[in-house]
Amino acid sequence: MKPITCIIVDDEPQARKLMEAYVSQLPGWKIQQLCSNAIEAFEALQTYAVDVLFLDIRMPIITGIDFLKSLKTPPLVIFTTAYNKYAMDGYELNAVDYLLKPISLQRLMLAAQKVTERLQARLIGSNQAPQPVVNYFFVRHDNKLVKIDFADILFVEGMQNFVKIHTTAKTYVVTYTMKSMSALLPSADFIRVHKSYIVALAAINTVFGNTIEIGQTQIPIGTNYRLAFMGRIS
């Protein structure tokens, strides 16, 4: 049986250590990473497609609630906090559970059972449930999470260990790969035209020879991508 994977996010070292000890005792659960803030958690989610986030609420830089709101397709969330005043916010965000510190192992086991029930229900109903349309995503830039609308992207340029996302307003340098960007961007609106370039079809001004012009930028069309590209614009 596939393990239930999770990430623990809490700015307090002792709280992280306690949750790690508790979750390690849950049969069939696997901790992928411990994070001390939302930025670390965001980066972890680029690596691990986990089932559950154990998420503290009051954290520096970005609160747990704001972080959850920023996620395009969030995992199931169990809030862990010392403050019950955020309970309503937590449930409005469809959190699985809301655990008040100090948390007992018995209380955590009840929350874990709710997770199991949610995952089973999702497995049964996922094929029938309509998926929400999301027209944006968030990237880490200058120690912040920045929202980028798909409609604002002109093209993506791949570098050695990162990509440049060129938008109508500015350019963002982020630690994505071209493969992950190809998977993230909607295929109806974007196409990869070179090993180092993905372009927005709506942003193209002209095509001449093996070159695409977007604004003042000339983008090469790779030999291996030319046939698929020409088929899209013909």
Image: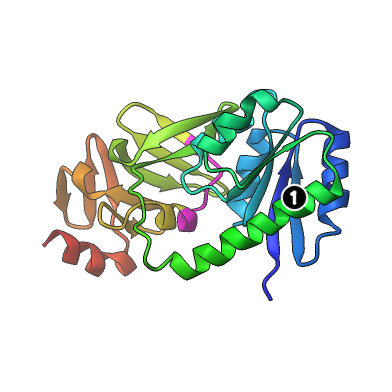
Magenta stretch: includes residue 177: yes
Query: Where does the image place residue 138, in percent across and percent down from the top left?
Result: 47, 38
Kind of element beneath mark 1: strand
- For this orientation, the residue located farthest to the left is 234
Q: In this view, does 91 lie above or below 230?
A: above
Name the quarter where the N terminus is drawn.
bottom right
Please give the name of the residue rendered at 87% of the width and 42% of the height, measured from the top-left corner.
17
Extent of the magenta region:
173-180
Q: Would residue 109 be found to the left or right of residue 76 on screen?
A: right
Query: Where does the image place residue 195, in percent across and percent down from the top left?
Result: 41, 59
Q: Name the residue under label 1.
A: 33
Sort mark 1 into few (<14), some (14-19) or many (20+) by Cα contacts within 10 Å.
Answer: some
Q: Would residue 72 be found to the left or right of residue 2 on screen?
A: left
- Picture quadrant of residue 34: top right
Query: Where does the image place residue 222, in percent across and percent down from the top left?
Result: 32, 61
Please give the name of the residue rendered at 70% of the width and 49% of the height, measured from the top-left corner.
7
Name the quarter where the C terminus is drawn.
bottom left
Please give the name of the residue rendered at 27% of the width and 43% of the height, measured from the top-left corner.
218
Q: In this view, does 152 lie above or below 7?
A: above
Please give the name of the residue rendered at 64% of the width and 52% of the height, measured from the top-left corner.
52
